[in-house]
Image: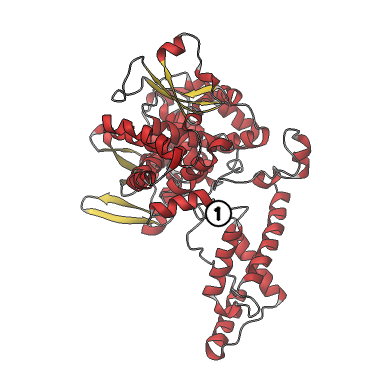
Amino acid sequence: MAAILRVVFGEDDASKLSLPNGIPSSVECLKEEIRRQFDLSQNFRLQYRDIEFNNEFVNLTLTSEIQNKSTVKVVYLPLESVVSLHDTVQGTDAQSSSTSVDDTDIPSLPKSHSSYSSLRSLPWPTNFQIPEFSYEVQVQLERGQQAFLTSGTLLHPSTKLKSDILESLASEIIKYKMYPSNTEFDNVAEALTTKYPCLKEQGSVCGYYGWKISLKYKMANYRTRLRNIGCQELIINGMKEKRVSMTSSPNQVKKPRKAEVNFCPDYPAGETKESLEEEREALVLEVKKKNNKQLIQRKMEQTFAYRRQEIIKDMPFIAEVKNRWPALFSETEIIAEFTRITTVPLLSTFISKLDFYSNHLLRVFKKKGGAAKVNINFIMAAMDENSSIDVKRECILKALCVYFNENPNDMIREYVDVDLATGQTIEQMTMGVYAVRHEGADSTEAPEDVGVVIEGCTVLEALGDVAKGCALLLGLIYSLNLQYPKDLKHTFEFFQKVLMELDGNKLSAKVQILKNKMLE
């Protein structure tokens, strides 16, 4: 999803930053984009306007704190200040205690920067850009183009030329995905023949079918080479790994299935499994302390690849993940983890898109007939008694389940505090959002508690409203590499592909029909 930011460089000096593929997943990637677009060479940090401090500028540590049309400020750092900061961190305990350093400056250090270097920062582009080929290839293509424009003669590339072109395309594709879909192969092949019409195939209806098939084979070979040199995202599907893991079928390929951009990244440069395990143990201790939010955020960024590999390879139970990674089970870190995995902000995107489509959904729901209409009308009656936005969102989410012939109680379950006191437990849920109301409460009263349960384990509490609970449940499914509940597969597909716009060009029949009706 495209985004724009207002970048302030100084007094009376601001520019617009265009981000065609949305806000990057990390602050370092955003800084790199600012450097590229505005040709900056000096080191700097970023600040943003924080509404909790009357829109004063504060240091930006997570890109999830900003959204489309936000304002960020560039604060230049003199070279000597970076050196002194590095010396301070590496110095003695006495020097560290006598020097006051803002935690947000630390990501500019080389070690912290390395934590982002292995991550992809952009999702699959709307329009795939063909890369610049080598000089030798470029010369042959330009001659072919001239002959095509002059006489309409198509270029018949030699085996070596075709292999070089496919190699460059595969190298560019890997920047976005290891396992492109059939549609994405179409995108690349079509972009190639659009940029170089001399490469079109006469025997193909679309003009690029042969290129598409060749590109699939080239990508398979390219993945094999990457696996042989130790790429973790591919090693997990090696036969040796599958023999070790007895919990999964040897034919089950562990790959992105929900449009994950950073599915199983490699460790940051200079890090090992042992060093990252030490960071994890330190992180567990930091969670028990107070006033160290920025340090926790930084350690969670640093251990992201280690955490993802553990979750994907070992597939631990939720209780075990919660014990080893307690910092992950907080609203802030779930939002950050989702953004690391998909490059898309979670909560702001989910809520804004839900609000954007709300009136369209209500119009479609009113036309629904049969038993579903009765159930939807019963759900929507709460909006007549309470016109708050939280109630409206909750009603729409429940009605969405009914529209897809799915049970809303499977996703959002309500409890009365008296029932919980008499022995009924929230942990009886397998996966979903719970809302606890006190006995005799009407629809105008907010729930006493809203939380999320996964595998019978309460992982989040005190969320405030149901819509936020649903968004964070989606974030947890991505963070823990879980499958969508089968009884709610269409509802979660709508969340992912329509609200979050992740892999939104491949919809099931039910979701496609609803989207068509919404946009009529």
Q: Position of residue 101 (x, y in %)?
A: 37, 31
Where 402 falls versus 179 (above or below)? Answer: above
Q: Residue at x 56, y 55 (%)?
A: 175
- Secondary structure under badge 1? loop
Q: Disc count in the image?
A: 1
Residue 215 located left or right of residue 57: right
Residue 234 vertical placement versus 216 (above, below): above
> What residue occupies the far left of the structure in this picture?
12
The picture places residue 506, in percent across and down from the top left corner, at: 53, 54
Q: Dot 1: within a 10 Å radius of its alpha carbon, few (fewer than 14), some, or many (20 or more) residues?
A: some
Q: Where does the C terminus fall, quadrant-wise?
A: bottom left
- Identify the residue under disc 1: 176
Which residue is the extreme one toward the bottom?
151
Q: Which one is nearer the viewer's eye here, 53 or 187?
A: 187
Q: In this view of the protein, which residue sits in the foreground, 510 or 496?
A: 510
Residue 237, picture quadrant: top right
Q: How is the image coloured?
A: secondary structure
Image height of 385 relative to 76, above or below = above
- Residue displayed at 63% across by 37% down: 312
Looking at the picture, which amino acid does disc 1 mark?
A: Tyr
Question: How far from the left and from the top, in percent, is residue 127?
Answer: 48, 63
Nearer to the camera, 285 or 361? 361
Report x, y in % for residue 200. Answer: 60, 77
- Outermost residue toward the top? 422
The residue located at (41%, 27%) in the rendering is 293
Task: Give residue 197's quadrant in the image.
Answer: bottom right
Q: Please indicate, yes or no, whether residue 172 appears anywhere in the rendered image.
A: no
Which image quadrant for residue 365? Answer: top left
